[in-house]
Image (spheres, helix red, strand yellow):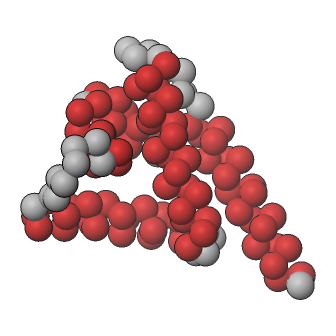
Amino acid sequence: MRAVLAFCVASPARYHLMLQRTVPGFTPTQESHEVALTALGLLLDRLAAAGVRDPADVDVFRGLVNGLAAEQIANDPGGRRFIDRAGHAVELFLAGAAATSANQTDK
C-alpha cells in the first residue's frame, strides 16, 4: 500500500484522474484501462493471499487506500504522515476483515 500511496502523492494530478474522476466526462484509453485492471488484479491477488476475498471487504480496502492518499495530498503535502500510517491501517483492516469472516462462519 505504501508504494501506491507514494505514487499517488508524487503525482496528485494523476491520482485525481485515476481515483477521483475530477474531470467530467473523462474516459481512459483502452490501454490505460487495461493497466488499471492489471493493477486491480494484483491487489485482488494480494488480498486473497491474506485471506480477504469478500467483495465488500475489497471495497473497504480500496476506500482505505483512496482515503489515505486523499488525506496525505490535502493535509500533509510534502510530508509522510498518512503514508507512514499505511502499515497500521492494513493491520487494522486485516484484523477487522478476519473478525467479520469469523463471525459469518459462526452463524
Query: Percent x, y for residue 48?
Result: 54, 71
Dividing the picture into quadrants, the one containing residue 99 is: bottom right
Q: In the drawing, does residue 66 fall left or right of residue 57?
A: left
Q: As rendered, which of 34 and 71 lies closer to the eye?
A: 71
Vertical arrangement, residue 76 with respect to residue 44, above or below: above
Query: Percent x, y for residue 101?
Result: 76, 73
Q: As rendered, which of 69 and 46 lies closer to the eye?
A: 69
Query: Percent x, y for residue 25?
Result: 19, 54
Vertical arrangement, residue 42 with respect to residue 105, above or below: above
Vertical arrangement, residue 96 with respect to residue 106, above or below: above
Dividing the picture into quadrants, the one containing residue 56 is: bottom right
Q: In the drawing, does residue 75 fall left or right of residue 85?
A: left
The residue shown at (19%, 64%) is 33
Which image quarter is the C terminus in? bottom right
Q: In the drawing, does residue 33 fall left or right of residue 59?
A: left
The residue shown at (68%, 56%) is 94
Dividing the picture into quadrants, the one containing residue 88 is: top right
The residue shown at (56%, 37%) is 86
Q: In the drawing, does residue 29 fall left or right of residue 4?
A: left
Labels in figure, total: 0
Q: Point out the residue furthest to the right here.
A: 106
